[in-house]
Amino acid sequence: DAGVIQSPRHEVTEMGQEVTLRCKPISGHNSLFWYRQTMMRGLELLIYFNNNVPIDDSGMPEDRFSAKMPNASFSTLKIQPSEPRDSAVYFCASSPGQGTTPSYGYTFGSGTRLTVV
Amino acid sequence: GDSVTQMEGPVTLSEEAFLTINCTYTATGYPSLFWYVQYPGEGLQLLLKATKADDKGSNKGFEATYRKETTSFHLEKGSVQVSDSAVYFCALSGGGGSNYKLTFGKGTLLTVNP
């Protein structure tokens, strides 16, 4: 099992550019989560998908952020246009089952460290 | 809403010292409680969990007991090793919020010196 795979591991971009972060969940997991980690705010849930459908996007900070899950094995988080305050580590996580709690297995990827200059 | 408060770091210990990282929570209902560990450059890994009051979670020599009366879930280890150096996060789910959502504390950096 390769785990949750995120790419790229590091991304440096200029303010105003579009950034796309990618995630491949564990095969068979049908819940997918995007989290953001910053020093100031810690770990925050951005969006939750179940069976490829966005269930809770209340954590998406603003319209510059969008997330998609076109199929069970791939998700993207896009920021357009990017700003320096978007600099953070973005984690993807997946878990099995519908409406599952983290008690049943919630696996995080290694994260993408985004720096916007 | 749900919240988790854990002790501010960083915590620096010598090898074989006793470790305690305090964690308290605020939630309605009966949340599940977790400790996650993040090693440098890696994602979060589940260290241990407890799903009801008085449950004790344990793994790799670490322990934490779900104390509903004090709304606490303190992490302990009797003898730390250099390899335990990492950031530790206390978290909860299924309190007043959604079952699927993890609410994290800010994290505590632990450094263990030889």
Image: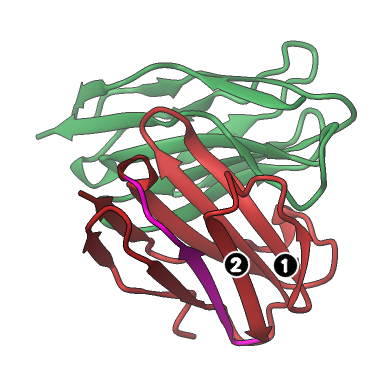
The image position of residue B12, as x and y in percent, is 21, 22
The image position of residue A48, as x and y in percent, is 70, 60
Snapshot colouring: by chain
Q: CA distance from mark 1 to mark 2?
A: 9 Å
Read off the residue under disc 1. Answer: A49
Q: Quadrant of residue B111?
A: top left
The chain that appears green in the image is B
Q: Which residues are magenta?
A: A72-83
Residue at 48% over, 77% down: A3
Q: Given the current orientation, which residue lies at the most extreme left position?
A: B114
| Image position of A61 (left or right of A102) | left
Read off the residue under disc 2. Answer: A67
Give the color of chain A as drawn: red
In the image, B92 versus A7, the foreground residue is: A7
Q: Chain of mark 1?
A: A
- The residue type indicated by label 1 comes to Phe
Q: Given the current orientation, which residue lies at the most extreme top position?
A: B70
B47 above or below B74?
below
Q: Chain of mark 2?
A: A
Q: Is residue A79 located in the magenta-colored stretch of the structure?
A: yes
Q: Answer whether labels 1 and 2 touch (C-beta < 8 Å).
A: yes
Element on which disc 1 rests = strand
Residue at 66% over, 19% down: B72
The image position of residue A26, as x and y in percent, is 57, 80
In the image, A68 versus B30, the foreground residue is: A68
- The residue type indicated by label 2 comes to Ala
